[in-house]
Amino acid sequence: MKRNRLILTTLILFLTACQTNNQLIQSNSPTTIPSLESTEKVIISPTFVEPTETSFANVPKVMTPLPELTVTVTNPAVGKNSTSIVVDHFSVENFGEIPDEVLAQASDLKLLFRHASVGENIRYGLECMYGNFANRRPASCSPFHDLKYDSSNWVFQYRGNNGWIEKVNDFVSQTQSQNENFDVFMFTLGYLDGFDGMTYPVISDEENFQTRYIEPLEKLETQYPQKIFVWWTMSLAQDGYENLTKFNQMLRDYAGQNDKILMDLADIESHDLDGKPCVDSSGIPVICGIYTDEKQSGHLNETGRERVAKAFWYMMARITGWQDS
């Protein structure tokens, strides 16, 4: 009898210990997946952004033809006999002078911009300024925004990074196919097109510059004399390149001599917020470190995006005929 009681007591103690151990195991096991928090790198695009699938060069853009557009401007500063417009780092300082009625006129202009990654940075900067986000405002936007900076009529089409000649040809063909839908046309080349010894044919060669860059674009402007065209210098990286620098200066000279509208992106990127130039050890202009978070390339950070977006608005305001002080 005593032996049976001893066995029973031992069995009860054993079962109790097993149950307690099982409870401890269960209590130490996670029962839910930890919640994930969004990072500051998350990009939320407003609803007016053009769908990606319609914006690449190798995908035909299906658009319903619009009636011929009439641009209503005061004292328009465009056309073959107009005074040239140069948008540079000095222009950004005059951004705050643009009257609201001029902003509204600029906002009404229909614009087509063919571009690659830096163009995406600029697009995002403009969207941050507009601030019409469907949900929360992205942490990668500064607090500065106002609905009067409505850029929803400005269509940014991502073209990619093929060769510079292909980019010129792309702009010509896309302007021809979409000319009825827009008032203002522009495209960009980037620092990848200006590498020393890596891009062929070299864009800063005088013959290449004239026959493969200038002449196709001049022919395009002659074909559409009622449209507005904006020329852009190349964006910069944190390494300086002689080929890129030479091309930018050749374009500045050409634009000034031929009454062009020039967005001098390189000049804006190579001057800091105080107007001090940024150069490498050889004295070649580079993007200021305050405008990019990268170590070698030149994609724009929050400060850079906002600064170029302000320059973009200044450019569009000048196109309406507005003159700053």
Image (tube, rainbow, N blue to C red):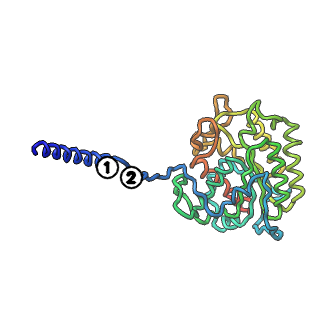
Q: What x and y, as percent, mark residue 36?
A: 46, 52
Quarter holding the N terminus? Answer: top left
Residue at image coords 70%, 51%: 87
Residue furthest front in the image: 1
Query: Foreground residue, 66 or 54?
Result: 54
Q: Tag on residue 174?
A: none
The residue under label 2 is 31
Answer left or right for 131 relative to 321: left
Does residue 121 show up?
yes
Q: Quadrant of residue 248?
A: top right
The residue under label 1 is 27
Residue furthest top in the image: 282
Query: Foreground residue, 1 or 178?
Result: 1
Residue type, numbered disc 1: Ser
Query: Foreground residue, 266 or 127?
Result: 127
Q: What x and y, as percent, mark residue 319?
A: 74, 60
Q: Secondary structure at mark 1?
A: helix
Q: Secondary structure at mark 2?
A: loop
Quarter holding the C terminus? Answer: bottom right
